[in-house]
Amino acid sequence: MQLALALLLLAQDAEWVQNLRDVNPTVRRSTCGIIAEKGIKSATLPLIELLARETDDTVKAAAVDALERLTGVKGRGADSVKWKDWWEKTGGPSPMEEDMLDFGYDVRPNSRLSCQIKVTEALDGLKVTTPEKQA
């Protein structure tokens, strides 16, 4: 039963991500808000890709809001190059990592397991905070 529910939820998430390509800007804008509200982190890269091709400023603003809410990252605005650069440096959590974070303390939208981030010179200046206690 749990597997069936999980598969149904994944299918629904994929439908929301597909709506980011709808021809109607109102649908794309609304979809950004729904993705942020539902916390569909798998939509992070599709939202970045939307920023790169979008011409409607209201859709761009909604995509930026969704990205900031999903990732906890601020200050990149509607610049898809900055978001893409961030994505390439940090990547996103895998589904397994997200499941493991469900058991953590003080988990935030941009929380990651430190063992899953490849430390390179590109991350020079990265600010890291750790929770006061760990599971």
Image (tube, rainbow, N blue to C red):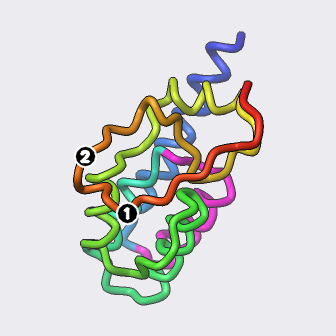
From this view, report whether residue 135 is shown above or below residue 14.
above
State the image quarter where residue 72 is shown. Answer: bottom right
Task: Assign the N terminus to one quadrant of the image.
Answer: top right
Q: Which residue lies furthest to the bottom in this view?
A: 57
- Magenta span: predominant SS is helix
Give the image location of residue 6, x and y in percent: 62, 23
Q: Answer whether residue 28 is magenta in the image.
A: yes
Bounds of the magenta segment:
24-41
Residue 36 locus on image (x, y percent): 61, 60
Mark 2 residue element: loop
Number of on-image labels: 2
Residue closer to the observer: 11 or 109: 109
Residue name at image x 62 percent, y 53 percent: 109
Task: Give the SS element for disc 1.
Answer: loop
Q: Which numbered circle lies on residue 125?
A: 1
Q: How busy is the neighbourhood of tag 2: few (under 14 within 10 Å), some, or many (20 plus)?
A: few
Q: Vertical placement of 5 versus 30: above or below? A: above
Q: Locate residue 103, reporting x and y percent.
A: 72, 27
- Residue 92 position within the rendered picture, expressed as x and y whole percent measured from the top left: 41, 44
The residue that label 2 is drawn on is 120
